[in-house]
Amino acid sequence: MSDTYSDRGSNDLSATKSNRPVGTTPQTGAPRNSQPKPGEPVLIGDKMTGGYGTGADILHACTVAVDKGQIAVIVGPNGAGKSTAMKAVFGMLNVREGAVRLRGEEITHLKPQERVAKGMAFVPQTSNVFTSMSVEENLEMGAFLRRDDIRKTMDQVYDLFPILRDKRRQAAGELSGGQRQQVAVGRALMTQPQVLMLDEPTAGVSPIVMDELFDRIIEVARTGISILMVEQNARQALEIADRGYVLVQGANAFTGTGKELLANPDVRRSFLGG
Ligand SMILES: Nc1ncnc2c1ncn2[C@@H]1O[C@H](COP(=O)(O)OP(=O)(O)OP(=O)(O)O)[C@@H](O)[C@H]1O
Ligand SMILES: [Mg+2]
């Protein structure tokens, strides 16, 4: 197994045979490694208020953020607005107040595909693979914006999730739930993101598969990619979280390091089952 994803300190998932300089977008060659202002996270949804269409606000001054190479986890009860917050950060929602900034640049009004071009990737909670396509075709779809050689990134994804290499010709719809989630994460990685957003990556998988997937997510973060994820397995997710957000009714209820939230009696009682 290659150690591409376990080489702490290397953030270069984008090393390819192309002439495109490392750390630039595949499409435009624009710099992607501009630094956020001091104290500013790589990605922040800052005091976001908004809802779907002309409906009532779902988010109320909700803030979520992630630092470079770190893992930020959003937890909270069903219907709290976790997926809505992710969609807002990715540009799928009308943010009426507040802002989204990537490396200090305001991107609140960019379309999702423009955010992808700037280094963001999003794996939604549902329908996140093309079931009738093969595993490999799914990965190729992830790279559709790229004009350079995608082979190396694909190998990195296969090294991260070896089972996908074995099943690369199989339809994604024939895979187990955990394997499908690997395809979804792999597809997102094919864009060579700097920030990877995952909405419940371990939904519907067994505890063992969940642990495995969390280990892989940690490996990805160690390459320098920032991870912002929603998790229903709150306790386990907070254990690997550099930063945690408890959302309730579209607002921040508790924020802290994963450790702080796990130790907080109110959080434990209300959200972690004691
Ligand atoms: N497409 C939509 N149009 C209108 N309202 C929506 C839409 N999606 C979600 N909502 C509403 O927004 C609120 C928050 O839903 P959201 O899916 O963000 O919650 P969640 O925290 O992700 O829940 P879960 O843990 O069940 O995934 C709910 O009241 C929901 O009914
Ligand atoms: Mg959700």
Image (cartoon, grey):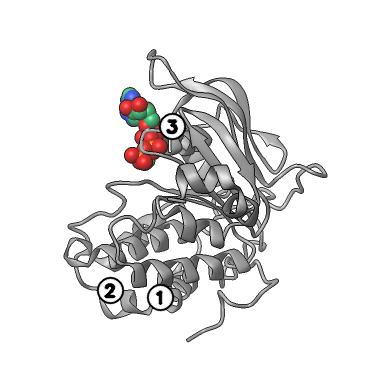
Marks 1/2 in contact by CB < 8 Å: the verdict is yes
Instruction: Look at mark 2 in the image and give the residue it sits on.
Output: 168
Give the x, y percent position of residue 119: 57, 50
Residue 173 versus residue 191: which sits nearer the camera? 173
Earlier in the chain: of badge 1 and badge 3, it is 3
Instruction: Look at mark 3 in the image and give the residue it sits on.
Output: 92
Instruction: Look at mark 1 in the image and give the residue it sits on.
Output: 158
Give the x, y percent position of residue 243: 63, 51
**Crowd rating for badge 3 (residues with CA inside 10 Å; few <14, some 14–19, many 20+):** some
Q: Is residue 41 left or right of residue 110?
A: right
**Distance (Cα) linking label 1 and label 3:** 30 Å
Give the x, y percent position of residue 49: 54, 22
**Crowd rating for badge 1 (residues with CA inside 10 Å; few <14, some 14–19, many 20+):** many
Amino acid type, label 2: Arg
Q: Quadrant of residue 176?
A: bottom left
Give the x, y percent position of residue 114: 52, 38
**Distance (Cα) linking label 2 and label 3:** 30 Å
**Crowd rating for badge 2 (residues with CA inside 10 Å; few <14, some 14–19, many 20+):** some
User: Which element is circle 1 on?
Assistant: helix
- Depth check, mark 2 against mark 3: the one in front is 3
